[in-house]
Amino acid sequence: MKKSIIIHPFLFAIYPIFFIYANNYKLIGIDQTIFPIAIILCVTLSLLFFATMFLKSFIKAGILVTAFLILFFSYGHVLEFLQILDRSWDKVIIIGRIRYLLPVWIMTLTVIIYFVQKTDNNPDNVKSRVIRIK
């Protein structure tokens, strides 16, 4: 049986740090990104470990952790976008509040957990991006 290495959770985890560095490279050095990268990689590895224990599949755990990281890092941006929409609508509809967006994010993650848990362990059916080691 071929073993799979799941790297996409780690790539999604370090992307925001490299994005911030790329936009501020004149102000900070690359050495100041090492500590945040180490922390986020350790957190991602622990999330992957616990998700693997919960789901009994490394591929499913990788998909779930990636979905969590995408939701986690996009929450503030979506909230800010909705608040900008609120200001442009002159308080007709107020949707850019934490009390409205947080339940949507939690329900989205819950639906993702449900569907990832219900899929079979065949990596072709899960549609994850893996690197095969022979």
Image (tube, helix red, strand yellow):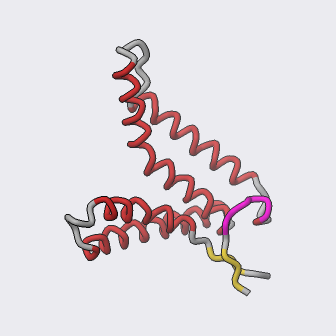
Figure check: 109 above or below 65? above
Query: Which residue is the extreme one toward the top?
Result: 92
- Please tell me whether residue 86 belongs to the stretch shown in magenta: no
Q: Where is residue 42 in the image (x, y as percent from the top left)?
A: 42, 71
Quarter of the image for the C terminus: give it: bottom right
Residue at 39 percent of width and 32 percent of height:
98
| Front-most of residues 53 and 125 | 125
| Front-most of residues 24 and 71 | 24
Residue at 44 percent of width and 38 percent of height:
78
| Front-most of residues 21 and 130 | 21
Quarter of the image for the N terminus: give it: bottom right
Residue at 32 percent of width and 67 percent of height:
36
Figure check: 84 above or below 72? above
Query: Which residue is the extreme one toward the bottom?
Result: 134
Figure check: 72 above or below 19? above
Q: Position of residue 23 (x, y in %)?
A: 31, 59
Q: In which quarter of the image is residue 25?
A: bottom left
Count of labels shown? 0
Query: Which residue is the extreme one toward the left?
Result: 27
Residue at 43 percent of width and 16 percent of height:
93
Q: Position of residue 83 (x, y in %)?
A: 37, 29
Q: Quadrant of residue 63?
A: bottom right
Q: From the viewer's perspective, is 45 left or right of 64?
A: left
Q: Position of residue 125 (x, y in %)?
A: 79, 59
Q: Give the range drawn in magenta.
A: 124-129
Q: In which quarter of the image is residue 64?
A: bottom right
